[in-house]
Image (spheres, helix red, strand yellow):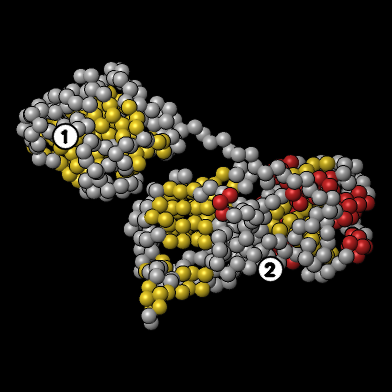
Amino acid sequence: LAVYIPDSVVVYPMDGPRRGKDISRTKNPSATLMGVGTAQGPDGRRDGSLRFYGRRNSYVEIPNTGKLDTRYSITILIWVYHAGISGPIFNYNPRGFGVHVWMTGRRQLFARFVRRSGKFTSPITSGRMKYKAWNYVGAKYDGRTGVATLYINSVPVGIRRLGRIKLSTNYPVRLGAREGDRRYFRGRLFCAQVYSAALSQKQIFAAKRRCFLPVPSPTPPPGPRPKPAPRVCRQRIDLGFLVDASRVRYSSRVILRFLKDTVRLFEVSRLKARIGIVQYTSRVRLLLGFRRNYNPSQISRLIDQIRLIGRTGRYLGRALTYTARYLFRGKPRCGRRRVLVVLATGESRDDVTRPARGLFSSGVELYAVGIGRVRRQSLLRVATISSHIFRVGARQLVSLSRIIKDKICSSTVIVSGGAVGFYPFTSTSSGRDVSRFRNPTAQLVGVSFIQGPDGHPKGALFFPGMRRQRGRLRGSYALIPNNGCLDTRYSITIIAWIYPEKPGPIVHYNPKGWGLHLWLTHPNELYLRLMPRKGSRHNVKPLTTQSLKPYSWNYISATYDHRTGLLTLWLNGLPVS
């Protein structure tokens, strides 16, 4: 059910679009902004708050034409991001003290409801403010009960009985600074609201989004234009062909010509493209494996040896299993793609879904070419994605060579079917990689095992930071060798559990310089910067978030998608920056 909220006296959003304008029905005069800027607000907008610089000439003053004089009861609500030591948040009477809400320490919130005569009452304080983070602050006084209450994030954190008094609210309001006082607020403020009634906790919670504006969906920057595929593909590829060798209505010369033309479009060598060929009907035969080195002319002669076996039925599922075992055997090599082009002239008599998934899980990209009357649904069960499906007639097959070559060669992402590196850092695995690539073991220096996020007593690594050992300062770190698997080049996802205590690097490519790096710059701040392969680190703006919880486990991720150009930080599965 909707919560009723009484009309406000004033509402000053204090952000970039609305500046010092009052958006309440009373239309109080606009506030005076002095020496303030804009910054990211609690609603995620870049100009969603006002930044105060902690100087005497950095403040906002709200005129009081009588509408701000609540006199008997009051509720003050405001979003606060504190980054200084102490200073006024909301202060009636710029030259003295009326009713006021202050920061008296980095995490100390202070509110005092001054009598109309100027006599002070007992203050209400709370040390629960989050430093350098957004806090939704409320302070209210109920003239009927004489009780004052302090709220942080809609939760009461302090209560004091003051008795029935008349409030000192007959002055202008100043935020950020007070004349004659050297304490200045440094940080950000957003959405100052004043009510002439004491709101309930539900009403305070319902008013927290009063000034929020929808965050404009970011327009992804145009990704890099795909470069036209070269006439000859020079990528490192293990390219396999699985050829249907059953006798069909037309000659096998069309299929053989397609194979020869396609192979000519790749630079065949031990270091570049390696070619493998398997033919199948009811039986399967390996004609050419990746371990033998052949030049293009030798491969052409081997292709001529393919003979039609006869009308014995097609068992593509059996052929896919055979191909996985004998052609794509062994673990995949980092930086070398695995591609299988399946040529089918009819429907298979056995299941193909499970063998195709097995090939994909081992890092093989599958292309399915249906020649003649082959159903699209059958090809979908084989191909990795729908764009890897082709249905052509016999006469159009030859023209497909360059199309398939361009699609294979211009693809910039290696479909790995899993993580390129997975280091659990537990007592069981120590520094070993448990991914299928089996990267070299990490070198662990100055670390020990400690309780992890799953509660296991030795389920995580503890990094004590710099420590003195035998009179010398020594660091603690885990060094992971990069034999090529960790060079993702185009897109990347980094996932980790962290327990932040002090600033330092979390993941840092290039120990002696600056590669891609993910750092903890404050106990609650995560910092990510991408490094281009050519150019200084100043070419790419960093991405930060201050949403981490210090001294507790946080599940963090950092992703970059080269297709959209979007860089994202994630916390506990949710995007935060």
Residue 362 visible, this orientation = yes
User: From the image, which quarter does the N terminus lie in?
Assistant: top left
Q: Is residue 550 left or right of residue 351?
A: left
The amino acid beneath tag 2 is Gly
Q: Mark 1 points at which residue?
A: 97
Residue 109 location, x and y as percent? 22, 43
Identified at 14% across, 24% down, the residue is 71
Identified at 70% across, 42% down, the residue is 225
Instruction: Determine the CA span between mark 2 and mark 1.
Output: 78 Å
**Along the viewing direction, whichever of 134 and 513 lies nearer the viewer:** 513
Q: Which comes sooner in the sequence, label 2 or label 1?
A: 1
Q: In this view, does 305 lie to the left or right of 236?
A: right
Q: Farthest residue toward the top?
A: 26
**Along the viewing direction, whichever of 501 and 166 lies nearer the viewer:** 166
Residue 471 position (above or below residue 161): below
Q: What element carries label 2?
A: loop
Q: Is mark 1 on a helix, strand or loop?
A: loop
Q: Bin the neighbour count of mark 2 within 10 Å (Cα to Cα): few under 14, some 14-19, many 20 and up.
A: few
**Along the viewing direction, whichever of 162 and 51 lies nearer the viewer:** 51
Q: Mark 2 points at which residue?
A: 330
